[in-house]
Image (spheres, rainbow, N blue to C red):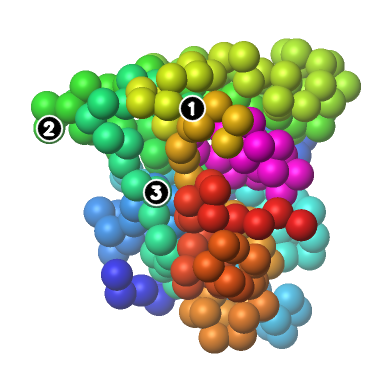
Amino acid sequence: MPQLQNIYRVVANKKLSPRFYQLCIDAPSIIGKVQPGQFIHIRVNDGLEPFFRRPFSVYRAQKYVEILYEVIGPGTQILSLKKKGDPLDVLGPIGKSFDMPSPETRQVVMVAGGIGVAPFLILTDFLRKRQSLGFDVPKLILLYGGRTKGHVFSMKEFINNGCAVHVATDDGSVGVRGRVDKLFSRIDFNPRTTWIYTCGPKPMMAVLQRFARRHRLQGQACCEETMACALGACLGCSIRTTQGFRTVCYDGPVFDLNEIIFE
């Protein structure tokens, strides 16, 4: 898919929780082209600091393109200060998207940690759209893990899409106390009717990978890496896979869950 670079305007930049923001961009040339799992690459500042663009999974693409982000460094700090009407230099959509589950799938489980929840709202949008094409909508389940209640927001948009949301936090301030694997009992172990998507910290995805292999479950992982070029040229976002080293920006960010070799 050709990548589009353009200047778009900020529509809204809303704080959802102490840690997370939701940014809406008026990007009509991206709407209708972006697929679940893809990302956009944003230049957050006109100056040289920070020099590189920042990658963000597309959270939703309906009237506007929306991203979900956490303020963790100078780039996202600058982004959090953007106001309605501010211009943003955006490149995208970029990357390999999620595969849609087979018609036999009866349960789709999304396992997310922290900001790894970002690519999954658009995925539920697409799964709901398939109903108008004659596909049955599988049962949608989101298993979400955050460090504290500061990493948890209402997730009402997932609920409105018919998704059952289950939350775990490290300190027990919201939901079940512990890591997201405490919620794995919600997963149907039938490999013929269950499909898994995941995004988040590598240790979390490694635990899920072992769980999926034990129960012969199939799925895909959306990987998070720091990216400089987002074109597969600099090799800075390379990860180890069963097919050798592959770049997250060009070969991914979506890979078969069993293909990734977690360090």
Q: CA distance from mark 3 to mark 2?
A: 18 Å
Residue type for callout 2: Leu
Q: Determine which of the numbered discs, if any, sits on residue 98 in the image.
A: 3
Q: Nearer the viewer, residue 126 or 102?
A: 102
Disc 1 marks which residue? 109
Which badge, 2 or 1, is on the more N-terminal residue? 1
| Quadrant including the N terminus | bottom left
Disc 2 marks which residue? 133
Q: Label 2: few (<14), some or many (≥20) within 10 Å? A: few
Residue type for callout 1: Val
Magenta segment, which residues? 196-212
> In the rendering, at what x and y percent does residue 159 appear?
46, 18
- Decide if residue 94 is in sight here: yes
Q: Residue at x 51, y 59 (%)?
A: 253
Decide if residue 25 is on the left or right side of residue 43.
left
Q: Nearer the viewer, mark 3 or mark 2?
A: 3
Q: CA distance from mark 2 to mark 1?
A: 21 Å
